Image: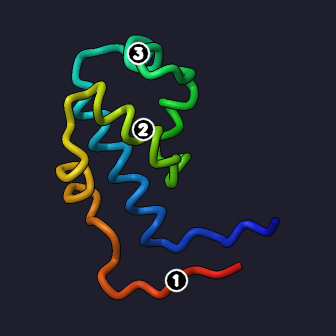
Amino acid sequence: MVRVPLTPEERERGRRLGEVLREARGPRSMASVAGAVGMSVETLRKIESGRVPTPAFFTVAALADELALPLTDLVAACGGPAEHAEPRTA
């Protein structure tokens, strides 16, 4: 399977996602949040730093739930889906 390269917009959305999650985490340690959702600290670090710009939906949903961050707020903060985006194909 060939992975289609991410667009600059997708990379930016991933950076914003990480920023919003990091702010929502506040003073809590990465270890406590990662442990609560069942992921490694390194995975959370990569998401928060934008190195994983497209984490799985259920990962984002678990983090949002743990951080009491409504998904609608998270989508709005990250710019939401592009209104007229063309579907990506491999």
**Which residue is found at the position 54% from the left and 23% from the top?**
39
Label located before the other in sequence (2 or 1): 2
**Which residue is found at the position 46% from the left and 14% from the top?**
35
Please rate how many residues cluster around mark 2, counting C-alpha atoms within 10 Å: few if below 14, some from 14 to 19, many from 20. Answer: many
> At numbered mark 1, what does the secondary structure look like: helix, strand or loop?
loop
Q: Position of residue 72 (x, y in %)?
A: 20, 53
Task: Say if mark 1 contacts mark 3, CB within 8 Å.
Answer: no
Please rate how many residues cluster around mark 3, counting C-alpha atoms within 10 Å: few if below 14, some from 14 to 19, many from 20. Answer: few
Task: Name the front one of labels 3 and 2.
Answer: 3
Q: Is residue 83 left or right of residue 10?
A: left
CA–CA distance in space, label 3 to label 2: 16 Å
Please rate how many residues cluster around mark 1, counting C-alpha atoms within 10 Å: few if below 14, some from 14 to 19, many from 20. Answer: few
Circle 3 residue: 36
- For residue 87, the mark is 1
Amino acid type shown at disc 2? Glu
* Image position of 26 with respect to 47: above or below: above
- For residue 48, the mark is 2
